[in-house]
Image (cartoon, rainbow, N blue to C red):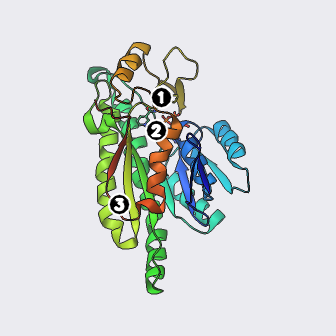
Amino acid sequence: MLCLRAEQVKMNIHLANKAAIVTGAGRGIGLAIARMLAEAGASLLLVDIDEPALVEAKSALSVNGAKVQTLAGDLTSAGFAEAAVAKLVAEFGSLDIVVNNAGYTWDSVIQKTTDEQFQSMLDIHIVAPFRLLRAASGWIRDAAKKETATGTIVMRKVVNITSISGLDGNPGQAGYSSGKAAVVGLTKTMAKEWGRYNVNVNAVGFGLIDTRLTRPMEDAETSIAIGDRQVQVGMQSQVREQATKMIPLGRVGTPDDAAKAVFFFCSPLSDYVTGEVLVCSGGMHF
Ligand SMILES: NC(=O)c1ccc[n+]([C@@H]2O[C@H](COP(=O)([O-])OP(=O)(O)OC[C@H]3O[C@@H](n4cnc5c(N)ncnc54)[C@H](O)[C@@H]3O)[C@@H](O)[C@H]2O)c1
């Protein structure tokens, strides 16, 4: 039985025998998603570039018999997606849920945005999810064909993470919003390609969720190591305050708020929903 942490609502959603890969699972929203999947009984491969964060995440989630493995590395590096899929299948013998969540911001107005910066945003937000789904495609097709031959239907789940920045645009985020907008195209296309394999492919677009990406820049821990570079993330306090005032529900979201929307698309509750984008933003649009 899954206990949805915030409200202690009990739901009978079991994901035992489901093997899930969650990218960017070392902290923030990815960690909250992984926790919710683990509590529902799924076996997990956690992926992150930040190895110490992964070690902590694994120890936090490895309770009550949860099966948790990790793979540290940069999702944008060549061959990483194939290695991740191979590890998930080798560890758990299945591939049922893919959550493309890893990401970061590298903001500036367009005249200050370098080619490297723009390309980095496309690499992590759209190229990495594309590669992971391509790497998973052979296994998914073979499994679905075998299941169909025996008259069984097994629904598999892909959830891609986007942002209201990708849906509505946001000044200072030409690269980020372009990558996040592309996620919608990939989601809708894969929903059409993989419907025949019984895969639900959906996206969740977040507004302002309280993680390292949105904390006031004065806070510690608002920079992220990517390759040799430290990229400044976080928001200016004043911008964060103004954005918070635009949220109809009146508060910044928590990682658990965000994870619940993703969990819907990982669960049988969404078995007849595909190609959709669910906005989880407390009602905010830019
Ligand atoms: N926080 C928000 O308000 C918000 C809003 C809209 C969308 N999002 C999206 O939600 C997702 C999760 O973000 P978050 O807010 O939890 O941020 P976060 O920084 O707390 O977590 C993101 C994780 O992704 C990992 N990561 C980044 N680049 C990676 C790479 N190249 N390879 C492997 N791992 C990598 C980081 O190490 C980190 O642990 C991102 O895709 C982000 O763009 C967040």
Q: For the residue carrying disc 2, how many other residues have a C-alpha within 10 Å: few (<14), some (14-19), or many (20+)?
A: many
- Horizontal side of residue 244 vs 168, given as left or right: right
User: Looking at the picture, how far across and down is residue 118, in whole percent?
Assistant: 34, 33
Residue at the bottom extreme, as displayed: 150
Q: Which residue is mark 1?
A: 213
The N terminus lies in quadrant: bottom right
Q: Is mark 2 within 8 Å of ligand 1?
A: yes
Q: Earlier in the sequence, mark 2 or mark 3?
A: 2
Are circles 2 and 1 on residues that touch, CB within 8 Å?
yes
Residue lying at 63% horizontally and 59% vertically, measured from the top left: 41
Closest to the observer: 180 or 41? 41
Q: Secondary structure at mark 1?
A: loop
Q: Give amino acid for label 2.
A: Gly
Residue 103 is labelled as 2
User: Looking at the picture, how far across and down is residue 274, in whole percent?
Assistant: 34, 60
Q: Which residue is mark 3?
A: 273
Q: For the residue carrying disc 3, how many other residues have a C-alpha within 10 Å: few (<14), some (14-19), or many (20+)?
A: some
Closest to the observer: 19 or 82? 19
